[in-house]
Image: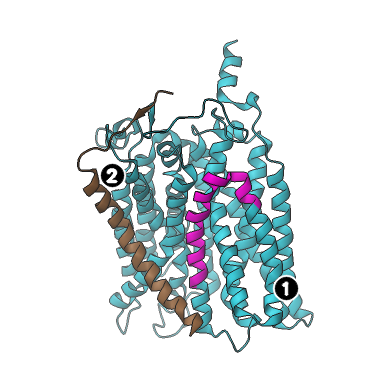
Amino acid sequence: MAITSVLDKEKIMAPPGYSRWLIPPAALCVHLCIGQAYAFSVFNLPMTRLIGITKSAPGDWELTDLGWIFSLGIFFLGVSAALLGRWVEESGPRRAMVTAALCFGGGFVISAIGVYFHNIWVIYVGYGILGGFGLGIGYISPVSTLIKWFPDRPGMATGMAIMGFGGGAFIASPLSVRLMSLFSTPTHVGVAETFLALGAIYFCFMTVGAAIVRVPAPGWAPAGYVAPARPRRLITTKNVYVYDALKTPQFWLIWWVLCLNVTAGIGVLGQASAMSQEMFPGRVTAIAASGFVGLMSLFNMGGRFFWASMSDLLGRKNTYVIFFVLGAALYAAVPYAGEIGSVALFVLAYGVIFSMYGGGFATVPAYLKDMFGTRYVGAIHGLLLTAWSMAGIFGPVLVNYIRAYNVAHGVAKAQAYNVTMYVMAVLLVIGFICNFFIAAVHERHHMEARKAEASA
Amino acid sequence: MQSTAARQGPGNGLKLVLAWGFVGIPLAWGVIQTLVNALKLFQ
């Protein structure tokens, strides 16, 4: 009890003079680590030849079995963020970050055991469930703390952290490849040792973030910042209790805004390599396609910071208007790029599309803060992440099935994605309509009004 | 809300350099690796 008290919210109150610019690196320590999830696929091929070493042998795992590890991780990210959001909010960021480090690092250690004994169910439990809880808790742990430290620029602050989630794969992918090459021998693939090393590295890195993080003292405000005396039309100064937010239309409209924005991007993201090669046969090689995927990931990461920061100037609703209008236009332009054979237009259109895909993730915590206040924003954000889980299913299914249907009905591969692009554009138009109807939350949902009602 | 603006404390500069370096260096390394791969698109 005494040892764990250093994790208490009360023990991490910032002393006078503490720089708020130390909080984004604390958040990045966590998000850069959990962003590894996007790079898990680098283990897929090596794990299909744990027995055969140079090629798959009888008894080796299939890619379809291995695909479930990532899917379970993302599913439990959504589940844990939704279930434990309130706990994260009330326990404070340090306890949440340490818990996330234990779950995420522990998930790798258990997975190493699963690889050692060649039991995939142990990996499902390790990385999929325990690691998934680490992902979910880690993802939401710094959100409300950042918003409280940066009341003047909440979009930029949360954008920086969520940019880390997009950037984590850039570190994890080459690091994992190098570690596997370091630990591999002619008779051994080296995956188990890599998992152990990554578990230790990520645990330490995330713990540093937990050590740095502080919460602002009550009444603290940045120098020169004057809180608005009256709420602006779409920015409340009141708070909504986490489960009361579920009773508002605003929560569900933002849920659909996020779901549709992510659905449009996530499906194409998974198919980006194949799509670029099939739309430009003979011009985009497999190597160039992998470069294209890397470039899109950079746009995805950069867009998280850029668009979330822009939302502080433009307003959250207007930022999503740009995502939906420009996104729909660009999706509709992709078939034209294929038709005229312009790789440059194709890359440019997708670059902007993926910047807005990342921007959608990064801007939504500040949108929730504007609607529901800062008190439970982390927990409400956790509940909203179920939209991500749903989009993770919708997006790839839509893209894969529409393409397969077209190819089965004699459409040339170069044109097989055209209908998909128009469907994505329509999804964004629906997202635009949902965003259009978002208005300020009725005051009867405010905690202050509820307390007054209860005491009357 | 009472506004108690924080003054920049002594030693914050070094802490900031260390904290941002701790996250910035690995991120920059990863971004450079990705950019090097991405350049293959234009070769």
Crowd around label 1: few <14 · some 14–19 · many ≥20 (10 Å): many
- Residue at image coords 35%, 56%: A105
Q: Position of residue A146 (x, y in %)?
A: 42, 42
Q: Is residue A48 in view?
A: no
Left or right of residue A198: residue A436: right
**Which residue position is annotated with label 2?**
A211
Q: Residue furthest right?
A: A409
Colour assignment, chain B: brown
The verdict on residue A41 being magenta is no
Chain of the residue under label 1: A
What's the mark number on residue B14?
none
Q: Nearer the viewer, residue B24 or B5?
A: B5
**What color was chain A assigned in the picture?**
cyan
- Report if residue A295 lies within the magenta region: yes
Image x and y of residue A87, in percent: 45, 36
- What span is in magenta? A294-321
The residue mark sitting in front, 1 or 2, is: 1
